[in-house]
Image (tube, coloured by chain):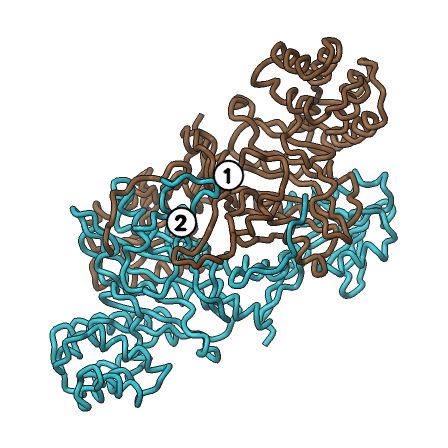
Chain colours: A brown, B cyan
Amino acid sequence: MSTPAKITPISGFPEYLPAERIVEQRFLDVIRETFELHGFSSIETRSIEPVDRLLGKGGDADKEIYAVSRLAGDEDDAKWGLHFDLTVPFARYVLENSGKLQFPFRRYQIQRAWRGERPQEGRYREFTQADIDVVDVGELSPHFEAEMPLVIADVFSKFPVGEFVIQVNNRKIPNGFYQGIGLTDVIGTLRIVDKLDKIGPDKVKELLVESGATPQQADQCLALAEIRSEDLSFVDRVRSLGVEHPLLDEGLESLANVIRTGLAHAPGRIVADLRIARGLDYYTGTVYETQFVGHEDWGSFCSGGRYDALASDGRNTYPGVGISIGVTRILGLLIGRGLVTASRSTPAAVLVALKDDESRDAAVAVATALRSRGIACEVAPTAAKFGKQIRYAERRGIPYVWFPGAGEPGDEVKDIRSGEQVPADAAAWSPPAADLMPAITRTS
Amino acid sequence: MSTPAKITPISGFPEYLPAERIVEQRFLDVIRETFELHGFSSIETRSIEPVDRLLGKGGDADKEIYAVSRLAGDEDDAKWGLHFDLTVPFARYVLENSGKLQFPFRRYQIQRAWRGERPQEGRYREFTQADIDVVDVGELSPHFEAEMPLVIADVFSKFPVGEFVIQVNNRKIPNGFYQGIGLTDVIGTLRIVDKLDKIGPDKVKELLVESGATPQQADQCLALAEIRSEDLSFVDRVRSLGVEHPLLDEGLESLANVIRTGLAHAPGRIVADLRIARGLDYYTGTVYETQFVGHEDWGSFCSGGRYDALASDGRNTYPGVGISIGVTRILGLLIGRGLVTASRSTPAAVLVALKDDESRDAAVAVATALRSRGIACEVAPTAAKFGKQIRYAERRGIPYVWFPGAGEPGDEVKDIRSGEQVPADAAAWSPPAADLMPAITRTS
């Protein structure tokens, strides 16, 4: 094969070395296993959608679409683009298959997506997301809004990443509150308050007043946004601001239900945080963000919310609630900063050594016996000196080297970390459970 | 979210319903698990490559590349295309990371690829491949050529698909043979003989004579191509044709080694078939194809071979041997024709029923207890009548419905297939192993 050009990475399109990929696989395995334990069905969608469908979604103006067309294409090639999230294709999938799906439909989807944005640390142009959504026809029961963060708490508590916190708000709270104090541009006000973390309260107040609020209204918006509680006390703190509106009541009741459920089933993981807004216009109820404690500067790793109309086909409306784990964002932090490592670069737990070329068949038979009991292994590539074969294992982090016939007539296996070598039978020996698969370790 | 256009599938971009996706997942799980047992490390590459790299690969002229560019792009957008296989990106990955990889490097890669070809049954424009390759620096030991089909035989023997056969040839055999009988256009001759299955021996002979062979030479080419054996008898049959060439000797020795290894470790799975050529020019030694017995008309589901130069960077050459499972092709046959089905459309083995809305917390606690022991479940969406909740489970194929408190004070669980309902403790009960995960069944 020819080598047409100098090889350089493409910015924003991350790739991993084998040991890093093992870390990624472990995270993906935990996510999938947990989603399935919670009864979500897997789907995958094609990577492309018609461009008009991708553009049809409101709100997220800063996204950039990658167009796809045949290189040798004719003029009337279909206008396709790579999907930039998993929500737009899921909404289309629900409409396309609505007659064949069972509602409420609980689905998870772990796939790549693409955005042509400027790459920077923690932002990628090709990335993997892991989404769960529950979607129903006509009406969606509110308890699903309380269930989402329980699933996410279950996933994140299995990651080797330390503490995390899921921040929850309900869009009806600021919505009703703003109307209750006489502000009518709810979305505009939300967008300004959403900048609180970046620009601080003084600047937010300034922007609110510029947009038409009185200083007193601006102060009330800030007072609401500063409310945060791990328990139900946020309700009284909002009430003490003295604002009345039916939407506010609805939002408080709904958020109280989410927090109450969190206290019962995932204590300490889920907090009410009334500054959380999420930029996307189509969220109508509960919204979620997730941060790692100590890495708040990286922003949210897992976000989502409730939408009254995930999809609509004229006859039916499909409300939904969903949340999306930014897998590549998480790994960009953990792998990029060396916070999590794998103990080896191969799944193999054992290298079967080779005394001479004639004994390869016997070595393969040992490997087959080990594999039949779920022990990953490989046979040494050459009958080099044993010292060289051991170094082959060492360089890959393979913990055990197997020596067929070394016990005359039996076999022996050496733990090359301790140097201990013991008699072993390929039909019976197993490594300690901790060595069977590569170990994933938090390094700081 | 708006609905900009009528929703229709895009031809050649397959998507599955949840129960079908469970079949796909099971196949992918078997492939991954088996590759890992054989000590292959996972990598994934980005979906795009520079177009000049995609075009730089010879041979496969009928492929069509999908170009990718920013929809709102400027003129000097990089020229990227979606990869059309996993070999080109792997070769680039090896060159890019050669200083960080351990050689011989055993890698597997399970990813989507894209080709802008005319879709038809068994051919897709977006599809998943599962590749293994072993690549080394400078020299690659020939025993890896014998190892590849053992791994594939291990994978396919775990699929619920009936009999399969891996057909092996060595390009040096026809290469040396053709030269030995005085034909110099080896590639041209191979391309004609490769059509044997499609157009038959008379037409092949005609084409060979048209291209300059004598009728006697054409007959000898056909006689070679008709040789097939499950044991080593092919060697004598080739010898009996009376042709001598050093490359022919090399090829026969190498193929005999592959077949001998197959007889020892995967008897009945691997046959010598001297008509197998593989279209791609860059194969230089062993080549593989795989067919399902009874579905030969679908062609090969799993192909590959040895290349002396998978990649080269001026200083080093990287020879390799690899084989690729056409996952979407296999599933297109098995799912498309309804030959394999899943017993349910969700991973959930249990639906926890809900007596009334107030008991949701208790139902969630049951679900949490079951999940902590690896039992996938979900809580009923509403406190409907129990008959309705049972039908909810039935429609999804969930085999068990759990009734908290039904045993007053204990719980009970019902197998809704048999109707049998028994006392059960969420901290101890497990379903039979066969019900824990969806069952995948061959239906004909």
Q: Position of residue B7 (x, y in %)?
A: 64, 57
Give the left or right position of residue B352, taking residue A416 as reference: right
**Viewer-proximal residue, A374 or B241?**
B241
Q: Position of residue B422 (x, y in %)?
A: 80, 56
Structural distance between the alpha carbons of marks 2 and 1: 30 Å
Q: How many marks?
A: 2
Q: Residues within 10 Å of mark 2 (few under 14, many from 20)?
A: many
Q: Position of residue B303 (x, y in %)?
A: 36, 67
**Which one is in front in this view, the residue at disc 2 or the one at disc 1?**
1
Residue on which the image places disc 1: A64
- Compared to B100, does A408 lie above or below? below
User: Which SS class for mark 2?
Assistant: strand
**Viewer-proximal residue, B433 or B269?**
B269
Q: Amino acid at mark 2?
A: Ser
Give the left or right position of residue A319, taking residue A366 as reference: right
Q: Amino acid at mark 1?
A: Glu
- Compared to A269, does B227 lie above or below? below
- Residue A391 visible, this orientation: no
- Compared to A36, does B396 lie above or below? below
The chain to which mark 2 is attached is: B
Q: Residues within 10 Å of mark 1 (few under 14, many from 20)?
A: some
